[in-house]
Image (tube, rainbow, N blue to C red):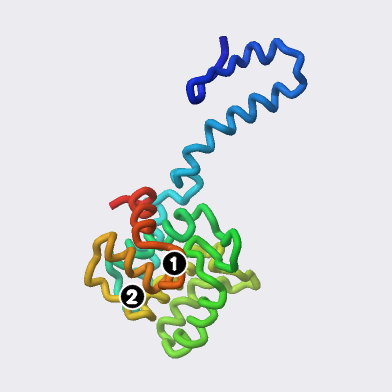
Amino acid sequence: MLGLSFKGRTVDFDSINRGSNPCKPAIIVLFLCLLFPLKLNKGEGNMIEKTQLRTLVRDTLKFLEPEITYSIHAENLILLTAAVESNLGTYIEQVKGPAKGIYQMEPATEKDIWINFLAYKKPLSEKLNQLRSSGALKEEMKWNLAYATAMTRVHYYRKKVEFEDGTVRGLANIWKLHYNTPLGKGTPDKAIEKYMLMVGV
């Protein structure tokens, strides 16, 4: 017998095939759909491979030196931001909102950083411009990972973030205060949960 068990119940595919029900392929597909998306719902699939993303983040943060000093705490903060904001790259556009990219930065925030901060930080702005496309493509926060990573780091740098507590709890508190903000729906506990699940220590 060809069959699968699910929640204590067994579906016999052989008996389905012997029947004359024209919907039998749909029955099989429906059953398989119940089985295999379960892992994805836990945030364990459809995301950027964490080691490769960490390497990209580290290389980008070191590229910003000496204007912004690299630290492992900053690296982990950027990875935590990606984990909680987009499930480490599962989403590059906010489902119901304007935010873009794996860090889910809103275009208004990106624009404000350029107009009211980078405009007065020429060496740093030159670094950011080196990461931007020279073509006519837009929405670089959505597809340009190095640029998006750099802009997220600049956002925290602008807030004068101090890494006095480099624990995951400390980084989650920084994310909540300066990125999600007190008005946001996110919580430090949720950020910790996502970081530990998708990135790990």
Residue 15 against residue 161 in the figure, above or below: above
x and y percentages locating residue 12 in the rendered image: 59, 14
x and y percentages locating residue 61 in the rendered image: 36, 69
Classed neighbour count for the residue bearing mark 1: other residues with Cα under 10 Å, few (<14), some (14–19), many (≥20)? many
Seen at 63% across and 69% down, the residue is 137
Q: Which residue is mark 1?
A: 149
Is residue 5 at least partly visible in the picture?
yes
* First-in-chain label (1 vs 2): 2
Cα separation, mark 1 vs mark 2, equals: 14 Å
As helix, strand or loop, the secondary structure at mark 1 comes to helix
x and y percentages locating residue 5 in the rendered image: 51, 20
Residue 184 against residue 87 in the figure, above or below: below
Which residue type carries mark 2? Glu
Q: Is residue 196 left or right of residue 138?
A: left
Residue 34 against residue 138 in the figure, above or below: above
Q: Nearer the viewer, residue 11 or 59?
A: 11
Classed neighbour count for the residue bearing mark 2: other residues with Cα under 10 Å, few (<14), some (14–19), many (≥20)? few
Seen at 64% across and 24% down, the residue is 28
Which residue type carries mark 1? Thr
x and y percentages locating residue 196 in the rendered image: 33, 51
Q: Which residue is mark 2?
A: 65
Seen at 24% across and 65% down, the residue is 166
Is residue 54 at least partly visible in the picture?
no
